[in-house]
Image (cartoon, rainbow, N blue to C red):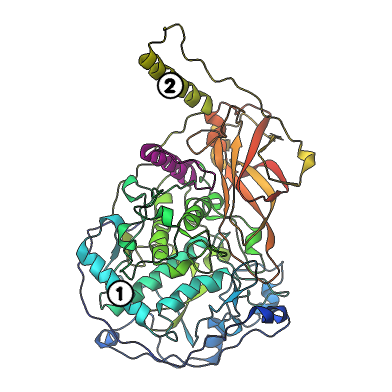
């Protein structure tokens, strides 16, 4: 993890814009969508992007390559590896890393249920292989957005203004940079060499963190070059700290290029609910600022510490060539707070929940990059929080690759293995307090008893009630149980299920070796809709269901709206939650069964089943 040094000073002037004929596909009307599956993929013209140079362009660039570009180089850049078609579709192949998309076969991305499309295809050219920046390059230290000064704001606004002023055929323009996320998330790309076609999706799996790290890396370097400042760094939205628990003020000025009008008005500074709710749902009750911070703190502890002790829990499940990403599983942080905040910021009154509320449009909001700055920071922090918290060593992860445009308009092929160390990328984060690491949740029965005692004390003091009328513990009622044989079923009300535990009273060594997990299987949802449900263990039926502040709360499933192909809105996935610490804290380590309660918050998913399992990695 890179050192967290003071923020660098600003320098420099803007560079010129770059011009060439547009290679974006023509817009498709709704009536044309019926022919989508049968038509050939859209193929833009082959053309090399030529960039005008400024004085700063004359300096050596570690991403430049010398010598002629071969046809094989171009094919590799497009993902069309020699022999890939046969090996990538072969389930017996020894290695099957996900390959970068073939940009020549990019097709319109899908917005939502109505089948409307978005043109997110980038221009493309010859490619080069990514090389880490020189160790002599200055560090780019990303500041907390709520702590920046006017000098930084002026520099940041200038950089975004210059990016937005670039023409649409410049791959570094704000429009094209926003389209990067759209194309990779809403079905504009198919996986290379896979028959029948499988959409390329960079969420719902272990490639989530590295893809977005590269995305920020190149976006940041483009901004820095536009203002001729090699130290420029994006801000991060410090939503895990009380002082950062609202949309940063720099994004709330309608006159600023950092402003986006398509946001939930209630959640803007000065709105009716400006405090960030990391456990957001439509049915969430408003909390006092102190209670909201406590809830957010406990969410962070669950997602980063107690519920993320294994790599697969934190990063998400593996995605290899040929796998359908939606069928895999999100990591803890991708679900919450990442997914919840996308939805919390977006405008849910719109058909497609733009801008942050849908993956196709999220990159149009400058706040997106600030949000993902903190998501990326969590990857660094997670590796400092306990033993065995390391990156994957599987070559299918390390050799998975993506395509991005760099600050010099060059198409760059990037492998995950080169993204693992932010310091080698010459990136760091401003040091800020981390207050959620040692959070300790309390079982509901203890919290309810304390709450009842406090309420009775206040009532006695106000009405002088005799001391004999003291507080009593809330009566515990067992929840009505649903039999496992009833699955699959629609989750349109809270249900509780007694799930057998294959092992109990495991030793400390066994717990360190394998995390006990509850698996919600066969979750079928409409991917174009907001979906959220909560999971609790041994939660007595004594009023409100367990929330983030209660030990019984295991976590949530969250879906940010997105689509892959017309007519393919339904998909199945799974949710895996770590529960070893939770069972210890509830004193249930010796129980033969655990009662799992599912509580729908938004939408009505179909649940295929439940089981208790053990996870080693």
Residue 159 is tagged as 1
Indicate left or right for 93 with 299 as reference: right
Q: Marks 1 and 2, how far apart in space?
A: 54 Å
Residue placed under numbered mark 2 in the picture: 455
Mark 2 lies on a secondary structure that is: helix
On the picture, is 16 further left or further right than 215?
left
Magenta stretch: includes residue 305: yes
Q: What secondary structure is the magenta-colored segment mainly? A: helix
Q: Nearer the viewer, residue 439 or 39?
A: 39
Residue nearest the observer in this picture, 260 or 54: 260
Could you tell me if the residues under marks 1 and 2 are in contact, i.e. CB atoms within 8 Å?
no
Mark drawn on residue 378? none
Residue 381: in sight, yes or no?
A: yes
* Residue 325 lies within the magenta run: no
Q: Residues within 10 Å of mark 2 (few under 14, many from 20)?
A: few
Q: Is residue 436 above or below residue 413?
A: above
Q: Position of residue 347 (x, y in %)?
A: 49, 60
Place residue 101 in its image quadrant: bottom right
Query: Which element type, helix, strand or loop, lies under badge 1?
Result: helix
Q: Position of residue 612 (x, y in %)?
A: 67, 40
Which span of residues is magenta-colored? 280-306
* Residue that lies at the very extreme toward the front in this rendered image: 463
Q: Is residue 130 visible?
A: no
Q: Residues within 10 Å of mark 1 (few under 14, many from 20)?
A: many
Q: Nearer the viewer, mark 1 or mark 2?
A: 2
Most foreground residue, 277 or 420: 277
Which sits earlier in the primary sequence, circle 1 or circle 2? Answer: 1
């Amino acid at each position: 993890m890179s050192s967290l040094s003071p923020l660098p000073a600003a320098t420099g002037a803007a560079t010129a814009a770059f011009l060439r004929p547009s290679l974006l596909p023509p817009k498709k009307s709704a009536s044309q969508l019926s022919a989508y599956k049968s038509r050939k993929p859209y193929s833009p013209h082959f053309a090399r992007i030529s960039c005008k140079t400024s004085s700063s362009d004359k300096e050596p660039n570690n991403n430049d390559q010398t010598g002629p570009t071969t046809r094989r180089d171009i094919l590799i850049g497009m993902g069309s590896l020699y022999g890939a078609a046969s090996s990538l579709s072969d389930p017996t192949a020894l290695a099957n890393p996900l390959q970068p998309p073939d940009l020549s076969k990019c097709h319109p991305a899908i917005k939502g249920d109505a089948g409307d499309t978005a043109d997110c295809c980038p221009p493309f050219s010859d490619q080069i292989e990514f090389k880490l920046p020189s160790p002599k390059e200055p560090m780019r230290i990303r500041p907390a957005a709520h702590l920046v000064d006017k000098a930084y704001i002026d520099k940041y606004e200038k950089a975004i203004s210059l990016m937005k002023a670039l023409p649409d055929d410049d791959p570094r323009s704000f429009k094209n940079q926003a389209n990067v996320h759209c194309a990779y998330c809403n079905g504009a790309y198919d996986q290379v060499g896979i028959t029948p076609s499988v959409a390329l999706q960079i969420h719902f799996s272990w490639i989530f963190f590295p893809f977005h790290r590269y995305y920020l890396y190149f976006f940041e370097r483009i901004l820095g070059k536009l203002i001729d400042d090699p130290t420029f760094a994006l801000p991060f939205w410090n939503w895990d700290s009380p002082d950062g628990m609202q949309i940063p003020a720099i994004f709330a000025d309608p006159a600023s290029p950092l402003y986006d009008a398509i946001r939930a008005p209630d959640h803007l500074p000065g709105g009716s609910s400006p405090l960030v709710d990391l456990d957001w749902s439509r049915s969430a009750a408003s909390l006092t600022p102190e209670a909201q911070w406590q809830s957010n703190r406990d969410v962070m502890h669950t997602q980063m510490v107690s519920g993320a002790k294994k790599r697969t829990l934190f990063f998400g499940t593996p995605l290899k060539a040929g796998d359908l990403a939606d069928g895999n599983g999100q990591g803890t942080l991708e679900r919450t707070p990442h997914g919840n905040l996308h939805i919390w910021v977006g405008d849910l009154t719109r058909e497609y929940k733009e801008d942050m509320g849908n993956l196709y449009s999220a990159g149009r909001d400058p706040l997106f990059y600030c949000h993902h700055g903190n998501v990326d920071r969590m990857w660094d922090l997670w590796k400092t929080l306990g033993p065995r918290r390391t990156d994957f060593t599987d070559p299918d992860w390390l050799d998975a690759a993506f395509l991005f445009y760099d600050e010099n308009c060059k198409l760059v092929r990037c492998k995950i293995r080169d993204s693992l160390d932010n310091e080698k990328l010459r990136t760091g984060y401003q040091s800020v307090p981390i207050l959620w690491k040692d959070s300790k949740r309390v079982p509901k029965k203890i919290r309810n008893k304390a709450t009842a005692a406090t309420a009775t004390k206040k009532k006695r003091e106000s009405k002088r009630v005799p001391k004999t009328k003291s507080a009593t513990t809330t009566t515990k009622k067992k929840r009505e149980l649903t039999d496992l044989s009833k699955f699959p079923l629609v989750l349109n009300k809270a249900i509780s299920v007694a799930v057998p535990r294959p092992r109990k009273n495991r030793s400390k060594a066994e717990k360190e070796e394998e995390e006990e997990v509850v698996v919600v299987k066969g979750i079928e949802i409409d991917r174009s809709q907001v979906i959220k449900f909560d999971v609790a263990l041994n939660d007595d039926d004594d009023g409100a269901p367990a929330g983030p502040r209660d030990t019984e709360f295991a976590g949530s499933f969250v879906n940010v709206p997105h689509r892959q192909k017309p007519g393919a809105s339904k998909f199945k996935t799974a949710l895996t939650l770590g529960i070893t610490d939770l069972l210890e804290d509830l004193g249930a380590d010796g129980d033969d069964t655990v009662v799992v309660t599912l509580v729908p918050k938004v939408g009505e998913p179909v649940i295929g089943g439940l089981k208790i399992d053990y996870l080693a990695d």
